[in-house]
Amino acid sequence: MGRKERREREQKRESYATQRSSAKRKNTLIAIGVLAVIGAIVAYASWMFVTMDQNAPGGPENAGALGSAHSHAAISVKIFGDEFDFSSPSYQIKSPYIHFEGRDGSTVHKHATGVTLGYLFDSLNLIVDDQCFIFQDGRSFCDNEDYSIKFFVNNMEVDDIRPVEIQEDDRILISYGGETAEEIKEQLEKVNNQIIVK
């Protein structure tokens, strides 16, 4: 084997070693860059978690922090004497602040101070005011000469249910129709006997 061949072989070996070393360095730099980006994302997420307030996005304007209250109330909505069912999935846990849960449609769960029943109905895409109860599909039940909407909180009639902030073990009745005083009394007794799921 001549000197020339030996030199060529050594140059190839050195060239191969240099290429291999260069490729390792490149892969190491890429790995360091990827880990740095992941580290930055984790650091930012941790900082956001530690510094954010306890309010979830989209919450009610005057609500306290989530967890600042934990109240349960029984509710019954009667339309011409028929019970409206909030246990279907389309009415379950639409807001972390106030909701129905566990496929139960008769207990309202409130998880922050300052959250009203008006916000509950807004989160369910129901329009409820002092004259109407309007469903998601557009069916509306509004005051007229024959029928009216009535609101009761703990057996006391109130003009508007929207500003009511429930307290533990409250009993709420919303009734639409042409009920007699005796029929309203029966509806109130029924809501007063409802089990509140906690």
Image: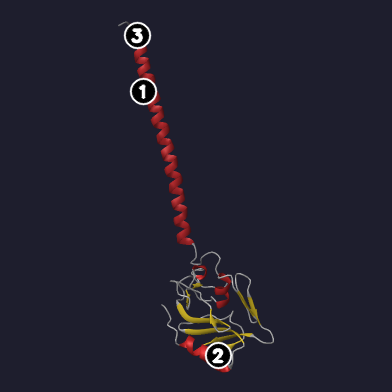
State the SS at label 3.
helix
| Residue for badge 2 | 184
Tell me what residue is drawn at x 39 percent, y 19 percent.
Answer: 15
User: SS for tag 1?
Assistant: helix
Residue pictured at 36% horizontal, 23% vertical: 17
Q: Which mark is residue 17?
A: 1
Q: Residue at x 58, y 76 (%)?
A: 118
Here the colouring is secondary structure
Residue 23: image location, x then y, percent: 41, 29
Q: Is residue 10 left or right of residue 122?
A: left
Q: Quadrant of residue 198?
A: bottom left
From this viewpoint, which residue is outermost toward the top?
Answer: 2
Amino acid on which the number 3 mark rests in the picture: Glu
User: Image point 34% across, 13% down: which residue?
Assistant: 9
Circles 3 and 2 in contact, beta carbons < 8 Å: no
Label ID, residue 5: 3
* Depth check, front residue: 109 or 69: 109
The amino acid type of the residue labelled 1 equals Ala
Quadrant of the rendering where the N terminus is positioned: top left
**Rounded to the nearest whole Å, what is the CA distance between mark 3 and mark 1?**
18 Å
Element carrying mark 2: helix
Q: Is residue 88 left or right of residue 145?
A: left
